[in-house]
Each structure stands twice: as structure tokens, then as C-alpha cells.
Image (cartoon, helix red, strand yellow):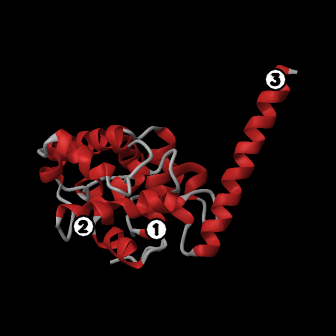
Amino acid sequence: MPTLRIAQDPAADELLGRDPLALLIGMLLDQQFPMERAFGAPRLLADRLGVDALDAAQLAGADADELTRVFQGPPALHRYPGSMAGRTQELCRLLVERYDGRAENLWADVPDGATLLRRLKELPGFGAQKAAIFLALLGKQYAVTPAGWQEAAGAYGEQDSRRSVADISGPESLAEVRRFKQEQKQAAKAAKQADRA
């Protein structure tokens, strides 16, 4: 079982390390929300549901309004608890329909990184960038390394990079990833302003 330090909270990180669905939901929630809180949310979700591990079939079949209330907290599991509760449910339904309700079946039998990337892009809420980052996270920290996974993950698959959640192994690397993201935002903003000029 991998030892993750993404949420910066021992109980939350322990769940991420042993529960692939928790890791997948953490990645889903990692948008417009602080990274550590997104990856800490699966632990809160499990606690509120009174379970030791998350179950895709249970979440897929949950009453939508009740699940939204669980996401609302307090504290809320996301900045947009209603839409993210719905997206989590969509994700779990797809896992039930295609992968026997098991997140790890997404990668259990993949022949190569390109196939895994394609599967990840098919998930609700996973665009090209999020799919590549999650692929890198699986390869770098979860020992899921099908042939060509680094190439499929692109720049996120590079060893010793500090681009994304895939590279976080503690507070220091979290700060480095934050710095990288801020630099990227500033560069994008500067490019936009240059286009207007």
C-alpha cells in the first residue's frame, strides 16, 4: 500500500493510499478548490457515511438530495457541493456499469499508458489535463506503471517535476507545486494581456 501525503492529514492520506476510489474522487474534486481539501474530502465523506472505505455502488445508488446534504457538511466537501455530489455519483455509476464498481479495474488490465489515459478521459469530470495528471499520480505514487505511462502522461510524467498533485510527497513539494501553478497562472495572464495590446 502506498504512503501518500497529498491531503497533509494522516487519516485522509491513509484512506487515499488504500482505497483507489477515494483517490479517484479526490482527483475529481481537485478543481477550483484547495488541493489538500479536495484530497481530504474522501475521508470526510467516508466518515459521514459511517464506512471504512468508499463503495461505488453505494454512492451510485444513493439518494441525490441526501448525497448533496452529505457534501454540504459543514464543512462542505467542495466549493460547489451540489454539482460535485452529482458528478461523484455520475463517476460511481460509470464505474458500476463498466468496471464492476471498482476504481482499480480502470487500470488492472490495461496494456499500455495510452489505453489508461483514454479510459480516464472517459470519466465524468476528467478532461485531458486531469486525466494526464491522474495517470502521472498512479505511475509515480500508486505503482501503476503500464508500458508508456510516462509518455501518455506528458510533462506530468517527468521524474522530479513539481507540476501537479502527482509530485506531492510532503509539505515542501506541496509548496513547490503551488509555486509552479502560480507561475503558470501569471504567465497565462501576461500572455492574455500581450494579446490584447
Q: CA distance from mark 2 to mark 1?
A: 15 Å
* Amino acid type assigned to the residue bearing label 3 in the image: Asp
Q: Position of residue 100 (x, y in %)?
A: 13, 51
On screen, residue 75 versus residue 129, left or right, reads: left
**Which is more N-terminal, label 1 or label 2?**
1
Q: Which mark is residue 47?
A: 2
User: Which SS class for mark 3?
Assistant: helix
Q: CA distance from mark 2 to mark 3?
A: 48 Å
Q: Is residue 60 visible?
A: yes
Q: Which mark is residue 45?
A: none
- Looking at this rendering, what residue extends furthest in the top direction? 196
- Looking at this rendering, what residue extends furthest in the right direction? 197
Q: Position of residue 142 (x, y in %)?
A: 39, 68
Answer with the quarter of the image where residue 174 lies. Answer: bottom right
Q: Which mark is residue 7?
A: 1
- The reply to whether callout 2 and callout 3 are in contact (CB within 8 Å) is no
Q: CA distance from mark 3 to mark 1?
A: 37 Å
Answer with the quarter of the image where residue 156 lies. Answer: bottom right
The answer to whether residue 91 is above or below residue 181 is above
Q: Nearer the viewer, residue 107 or 65?
A: 65
User: Which SS class for mark 2?
Assistant: helix
Label 2: few (<14), some (14–19) or many (≥20) C-alpha neighbours in 10 Å: few
Label 3: few (<14), some (14–19) or many (≥20) C-alpha neighbours in 10 Å: few
Query: Which image quarter is the C terminus in?
Result: top right
Residue occupied by mark 3 = 195
| Residue in view at x 34 percent, y 55 percent | 24
* Amino acid type assigned to the residue bearing label 2 in the image: Asp
Label 1: few (<14), some (14–19) or many (≥20) C-alpha neighbours in 10 Å: many
Q: Nearer the viewer, residue 24 or 71?
A: 71
